[in-house]
Amino acid sequence: MKKMKISKKQLAAAAFAAFFLIMAVCTGISRIAASILVPKVTTESVQEGKLSVVIQGKGIVETRMESLISLEKGLRVEKILSAGTVVKKGDVLLQYDKAYLQESVDKKRAEIQKLELAVQQARITGQPPARAAATDGAARDVQLSEENYARAEEGYSMAATNYDEGILLLQQTLEREKQAAEEEKMGAMKQAQELEQAGKTEEAELLRRQAEEAAQQRIAQAQTVYDGSVQELEIQKQQALADLQMQESARDQAYNAYESAKEQDAVAAANDQKTAEAGGYTIQSVQVDLDMAKKELAKLEQAQAENAEVKASENGVLRESGVTAGGVTDETSFLAIGWGGYRIKGSLAAEDLSKAEVGDEVKITVPGQGKTLKKNIEEILSGTAGSGKILGSGAENGGADSSGNTVAAGSFYAFLNENEAVYGSEVSYEINRQTESAYKQVLPLSAVRKDVDGTYCLVAEKEETILGAEYKAKRIPVTVAEKDGTHAAVTSTLTDEDKVIVGSSKEIAPEDKVRLKE
């Protein structure tokens, strides 16, 4: 018995030893598998700091100031400098065709001579003809129309009186007939009642019907007589009214004709006055044209005196011209002269427009010179005031033209010395500075992720398991406030102790197991 008891203890000890051995082997196998399958990640803690602002793009060399020279209209251009030509004060920008200029002078002188003759003609014309009064016959027609109207008015008054009196008399007659018919009917009804009391019912009923029919027939006959008489009275009254209205219309026409005659006489007198005044107005109008023609002739003669040349008033560049050689100038023809030194006009994309500031240092690379100029931004313009140039391929977030190039949302300007660049040449620029304020949370761009649910980062979160400490990727939502080429400023619930995943040996997703790089 004792020997068997010892064997059981040994067996239990062996079982425990085997269990721990198996656990050790499983743990080892698990760690080996994890080292092969679980992604290894690099982590960093969230930092406080500033972002770097780097803006790159293209620009063009232009002049600081611009003046417009209006050209005399109606002249042919013989020669003109090309846009972009550098000029000095007094250089000839444009040469008019002298023969064409002489023809213009001759035409203008002929025009002036015609206008002077027109002034003389206006002074001679304008004598009004003799006029006869138109109111004499119209006054006689008015008197006759008044007499006719008075007779018609009297006739209408009599017809209206006859109508009123006749209606009253007819109504009285109609009422008497109705009353008599009713009385006759009542008498017959009384007789019918007596017959009915005597037992003669059929005779009584017949008498009642006959009495009713006789009364209705008498009343209807009386009503017919009344209606016919009223209609006749109304016709007489309407005829009298129509005659009155006709005479009233004739009287109104006579008065209108009289007033029209007076107006004609007044208009005739006024026309005579206006004829005289019109001559004066014509003279004034032609005189205005004459004065204008003389001023235009003076300009043409001045152009001849200047040898038909347009010269530069300042040292600068012929930036633009609204005419070409062989063309004829009009009211919109001009020359644009740039002067006052050179400047860079740098195109800014929409996302860079708010980042650049006046005073920022800008590095300018001029092709072919092999050197970089350091200047400061003097001015920034947004919208149509500063846009219009096409950005380089590195620009982002601007609009796009039909060719797919990005259109600038604005421009900055930096002054240059004249010997530092050539007008019209394209340059490259770079603006590099840090943000003015520091951000409390800054992460590498590799830590910032995005999916359909929003922007987030992954944090390696430690968990204790039966096999020991393990790490799992936990999703933390973030909001990106600003970013540069390498980092992003964010707002989130991250703490300094959080291990933010910035790199991984494999693709990972939230809740995936991860290993930390040692």
Image (cartoon, helix red, strand yellow):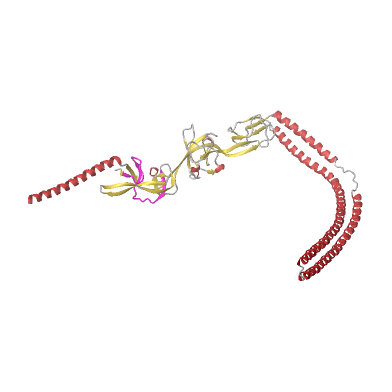
Locate residue 450, reporting x and y percent.
41, 44
Could you tell me if residue 46 is visible in this image?
no
Could you tell me if residue 292 is visible in this image?
yes
Horizontal side of 436 relative to 174 (left or right) equals: left
Along the line of sight, which residue is nearer the eye, 417 or 159?
159
Q: Residue, x 71% and y 29% (percent of image)?
A: 100
Locate residue 170, reporting x and y percent.
85, 63
Locate residue 495, reporting x and y percent.
36, 51
Along the line of sight, which residue is nearer the eye, 71 or 401?
401
Along the line of sight, which residue is nearer the eye, 227 or 397?
227
Horizontal side of 499 relative to 157 (left or right) equals: left
Horizontal side of 264 relative to 43 (left or right) equals: right
Indicate whether residue 490 is drawn in magenta.
yes
Locate residue 317, reporting x and y percent.
58, 35
Q: What's drawn in magenta, residue-wise?
A: 487-514
Indicate whether residue 274 is drawn in magenta.
no
Along the line of sight, which residue is nearer the eye, 274 or 214?
214
Horizontal side of 88 relative to 500 (left or right) equals: right
Q: Residue, x 64% and y 29% (percent of image)?
A: 325
Q: How many marks?
A: 0
Spot the residue most to the front.
Answer: 199
Figure quadrant of the C terminus: top left
